Amino acid sequence: MAHIAENFEHIKKTIPADVKLVAVSKTKSAEEIMELYNCGHRIFGESKAQELVPKYEELPKDIKWHMIGHLQSNKVKYIAPFVSLIHSVDSFKLLKTVNKEAKKNHRTIDCLLQMHIAEEDTKFGLDMQEVCEILESKEYAQMQNIRITGLMCMATFTEDTEQIKREFRQLHGFFGTIKEKYFSQDPDFRERSMGMSDDYTIAIAEGSTMVRVGSLLFGKRDYTK
């Protein structure tokens, strides 16, 4: 597994110091995660609650676990005691559930609002109108146990780099509008989670503050798991 350490050192050189690297560890073993942990890395991202919980229980407690995949409301309770950041809040219903479960655990959970910017219909996410409706609602104003710290998106899966740039640029524009209108006095609202293994360098050029990289670190994903 020495290649993981080599991959990590290579990728670190391509990411500015002010951009966070989320190591996407879905389907990866505890041993593979520890290889990266032993290089000093602490932020790992998982897509499924049922895979995240046992990893949290088994692995060192100073790991910051991010939920990056589509999250069903009925799974929030399993990760609420420990999750560091939820990237994929794509509905008001889910945000309400996160707030409720965070309150039960006497925590405040950081969240990103997932916005739909891709030109394909398979991606989850909110549009601008839905984000405004959430942030202007009385219910949101009363939420004490969530903190919205930015936005997340997934670009279209395409080799058309101009389209990918356009989509990332759109999220950056949304971020600026939402920041100015709702979070101008809130320094916590600062994250743009965009970019994965195939497009993270484009995302950084378009203003990403957080990239989600898996296969370039660990090798290609095992789809049999």
Image: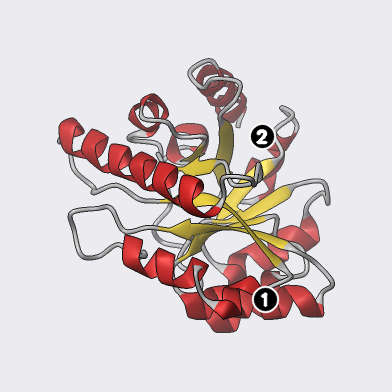
| Residue pointed to by mark 2 | 36
Rendering colour mode: secondary structure
Above or below residue 77? Residue 213 is above
Label total for image: 2
Residue 72 can be seen in this image:
no
Say which quadrant the N terminus sits in. Answer: top right
Q: Position of residue 174 (x, y in %)?
A: 37, 48
Q: Position of residue 102 (x, y in %)?
A: 74, 73
Quick one: label 1 or label 2, which is nearer the N terminus?
Answer: 2
Q: Nearer the viewer, residue 209 or 142?
A: 142
Q: Tags 1 and 2 in contact by the CB under 8 Å rule?
A: no
Q: Secondary structure at mark 2?
A: helix
Q: Position of residue 88 (x, y in %)?
A: 49, 61
Q: Secondary structure at mark 1?
A: loop
Q: Amino acid type of disc 2?
A: Leu
Identified at 79% across, 63% down, the residue is: 57
Q: Position of residue 205 (x, y in %)?
A: 37, 24
Which-is-in-front pick, marks 1 and 2? 1
In this rendering, position of residue 33 left or right of residue 7: right
Above or below residue 9? Residue 203 is below
Identified at 36% across, 64% down, the residue is: 125
Q: Nearer the viewer, residue 110 or 221?
A: 110
Above or below residue 118? Residue 176 is above
Identified at 18% across, 54% down, the residue is: 119
| Residue pointed to by mark 1 | 142
Above or below residue 169? Residue 139 is below
Residue 52 can be seen in this image:
yes
Q: Counting other residues with Cα less than 10 Å from the Cα at mark 1, is it few (<14), some (14-19), or many (20 or more)?
A: few
Q: Nearer the viewer, residue 82 or 33?
A: 82
